[in-house]
Image: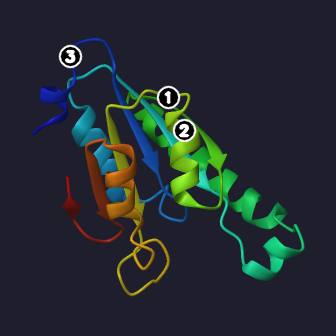
Amino acid sequence: MTPRDRTAGGRFRILAIANETVDGDALHELIVEHAAGLATEILVVAPALNSRVRHWFSDEDGARQAAELRLAISIERLERAGIRAYGWIGDADPLEAIADAVAVFEADELIISTHPERAPNWLARDVVRRARGRFGLPTAHVVVGRALIAA
């Protein structure tokens, strides 16, 4: 099923969640592909990931600044591609970041961008499967440096 089949008029709304991969080619190529020929609006959420020690000491400034920079690059790139985009820094827990976003942004599709399997975190925590079950949105998973995994 294509994005065109899922939207019933108006804007096609995509929620993308990514942290270190937010400015990666694979994510942007997938978004542009899904937005092709549709009036599309995208909300990009970049969780501010931090080490447990820094989180314990409420030292999130570095993680937040890095996420803000990657997010700004991503938004600018999407806008250059003609896609109406905006974003924010989300909760460090990707599922909570998605929950916060869907509370205010009625998405037609969720795109989750991760590192490959060898980089444990979101994949080790089964975030993609859990997000599909929890939010009931058509969900695409893209791995940086590889093709689309699932839609």
Of marks 1 and 3, which one's residue comes earlier in the chain? 3
From the top left corner, tell me how far across and down residue 31 is, in percent. Answer: 32, 43
- Kindly check if marks 1 and 3 are in contact, taking CB atoms under 8 A apart as contact: no
Q: Of the residues shown, which amino acid type is indicated by label 2? A: Ala
Task: Using the rendered image of the protein, determine whether residue 76 is visible from the camera's viewpoint.
Answer: no
In the depicted structure, whether residue 121 falls above or below residue 31: below
In the depicted structure, whether residue 40 falls above or below residue 26: above
Of marks 3 and 2, which one's residue comes earlier in the chain? 3
Q: How far apart, in angstroms, are the residues tagged by discs 1 and 3?
A: 17 Å
Secondary structure of the residue carrying tag 1 is loop
Residue at figure coordinates x 19%, y 33% from the top left: 3
Q: Is residue 20 left or right of residue 66?
A: left
Residue ID for mark 1: 105
From the top left corner, tell me how far across and down residue 102 is, in percent. Answer: 49, 36
Q: Residues within 10 Å of mark 1 (few under 14, many from 20)?
A: some
Secondary structure of the residue carrying tag 3 is loop
Q: Of the residues shown, which amino acid type is indicated by label 3? A: Ala
Name the foreground residue: 21 vs 79. Answer: 21
In the depicted structure, whether residue 60 falls above or below residue 29: below
Residue ID for mark 2: 101
Q: How far apart, in angstroms, are the residues tagged by discs 1 and 2?
A: 6 Å
Q: Is residue 69 left or right of residue 150?
A: right
Residue ID for mark 3: 8
In the depicted structure, whether residue 82 falls above or below residue 100: above
Q: From the image, which quarter does the N terminus lie in?
A: top left
Task: Using the rendered image of the protein, determine whether residue 95 is visible from the camera's viewpoint.
Answer: yes
- Kindly check if marks 1 and 2 are in contact, taking CB atoms under 8 A apart as contact: yes
Q: Of the residues shown, which amino acid type is indicated by label 1? A: Phe
